[in-house]
Amino acid sequence: MILSMTGVGRAELRQGEWTAHAEVRTLNNRFLDLNLRLPPVLRHREPEVRTLIAERVQRGKTDVALLLLSEKAAPAAINLQTLMAYYAQLRPLIKKFNAKKSDLLPVLLQLPDIMQSTRDDADELLWTLARSTLVQALDLLQSYRKEEGKNMETALRRHTEQILLLLAETEPMEEERRRQIRNRLQDQLAHWRTDAGLDAARLEQELIYYLERMDFTEEKVRLSAHASFFLQTLSEPESNGRRLTFIAQEMGREINTLGAKAYHAGIQQQVVRMKEELEKIKEQLQNVL
């Protein structure tokens, strides 16, 4: 089973006068890149929220918004200590910019944490409501990722099986390939025999080296093994996009070597088609968790 890194989950829960909204959106990324928006009343819970999201999301560019709304208007009070701290920092600027002191108060009242609620709401109640809402949104995100993952898995299997089919189709071309190589060697040997200074031992070494370079049996065996391992990894219960990416890289190495050693137009055409299928696999893997 694989999971998509792209997904969305939304949830809304209500308890008493409070309503919690949570939305989670994810896109593909190599690591967890989290952009988190929390209401002021939950800012001290940010480490717990980040841990919860990291455990569920794991990887991806992630935007999370968590809101708490109340039906009752909460009376507000000025946080005098914070206001005076801001004023101490802004006062030197009044003279510098020749501003009026009367213009400063409206600015101060708009600064963060100046206004605070006077209602003594239970912290645990709000946290429990917010956490439950976030968990529900993350569960919906996971369901979305699973559905997307099913479609991606189907495509990845199809492309991998096509590579194996193209590899199998090179087998009937092997006899013609061997005949072409044999004829080429015979022509070259006939030309070399006219050279009176021909070294038989050196010639034998060169032939062995030449034949080894053209033998791609090991590459075909390894490519088949890598493709089988890729399909096996797709069937594992946990999504493992990184491992699949590594396997695809190994498949690419074997396909490239196969093409370099082919010395046969038909086989090289099959190699080109294998590369096309592999590129489709790599495109899909960019979005696999």
Image (cartoon, grey):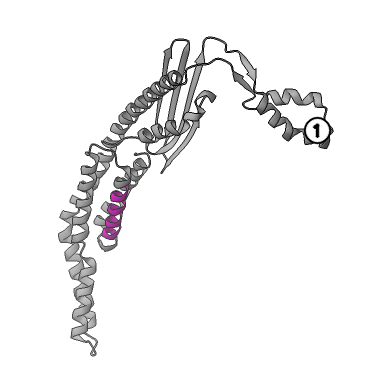
Q: Is 104 positioned to the left or the right of 3 in the image? A: right
- Residue occupying image coordinates x 39% and y 39%: 59
Residue at x 43% of width, y 35% of height: 27
Magenta residues: mostly which secondary structure? helix
Callout 1 environment at 10 Å: few (<14), some (14 to 19), or many (20+)? few
Q: Is residue 6 found inside the magenta-colored segment of the image?
A: no
* Residue stretch rendered in magenta on the structure: 245-259
In the rendered image of this protein, does residue 148 appear above or below residue 130?
below
For residue 286, which quarter of the picture? top left
Direction from residue 205 to residue 272 in the image, left or right: right
Residue 34 visible: yes
Q: Quadrant of the C terminus?
A: top left
Amino acid on which disc 1 is placed: Ile
Q: Residue 210's x, y, as percent?
A: 23, 72
Residue at disc 1, secondary structure: helix
Give yes or no for residue 254 being in the magenta stretch: yes
Name the foreground residue: 58 vs 254: 58
Residue 256's image quarter?
A: bottom left
- Locate the N terminus by quadrant: top left
Q: Where is residue 236 in the image (x, y as percent from the top left)?
A: 22, 39
In the displayed structure, 271 sits above or below 46; it is below
Residue 169 showing in the rendered view: no
Give how far across and how far down residue 119 sits, in percent: 55, 14
Q: Mark 1 points at which residue?
A: 94
